[in-house]
Amino acid sequence: MKKFSTMKEAFDYWAKSIYPTLTPDVKKGRYTSAWKDYTYQQGISEKRMTEILSEFGKVDIKLEITFTPN
């Protein structure tokens, strides 16, 4: 299990560690498109990042907000 502070960090891990290990037939289409959009900063939504990551493992997103009044 790996923990990340942001979706961007998690997707960066996927783009640099998992994507390169994929076979050429798997890299076709949406994975290559997502990798290029992320790598070349052409814009990729967090929703799309989450969808891609969930195809390679379990993704748990937890948001924690703490408010302490004066």
Image: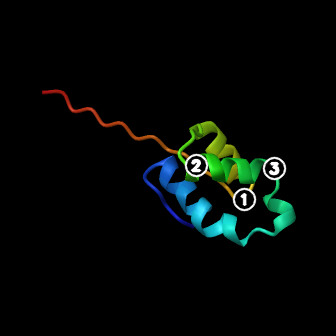
Left/right placement of residue 3 relative to residue 69 reads right
Q: Are marks 3 and 2 in contact (CB under 8 Å)?
A: no
For image coordinates 69% across by 44% down, the residue present is 51
Picture disc at residue 29: 3
How far from the left and from the top, in percent, is residue 40? 56, 49
Q: Nearer the viewer, residue 1 or 12?
A: 12
Question: Which sits earlier in the primary sequence, circle 3 or circle 2?
Answer: 3
Question: Which sits earlier in the primary sequence, circle 1 or circle 3?
Answer: 3
Picture disc at residue 47: none
Q: Are marks 1 and 2 in contact (CB under 8 Å)?
A: no
Q: Nearer the viewer, residue 65 or 18?
A: 18
Q: Secondary structure at mark 2?
A: helix
Classify 10 Å Cα crowding around label 1: few (below 14), some (14-19), many (20 and above). few
Left/right placement of residue 70 relative to residue 36 reads left
Classify 10 Å Cα crowding around label 3: few (below 14), some (14-19), many (20 and above). few
User: Which quadrant is home to the C terminus?
Assistant: top left
Q: CA distance from mark 1 to mark 2?
A: 17 Å
Left/right placement of residue 45 relative to residue 6 reads right
Q: Amino acid at mark 2?
A: Tyr
Q: How does the figure colour the protein chain or chains? A: rainbow
Residue at which label 2 appears = 38
For image coordinates 70% across by 49% down, the residue present is 52
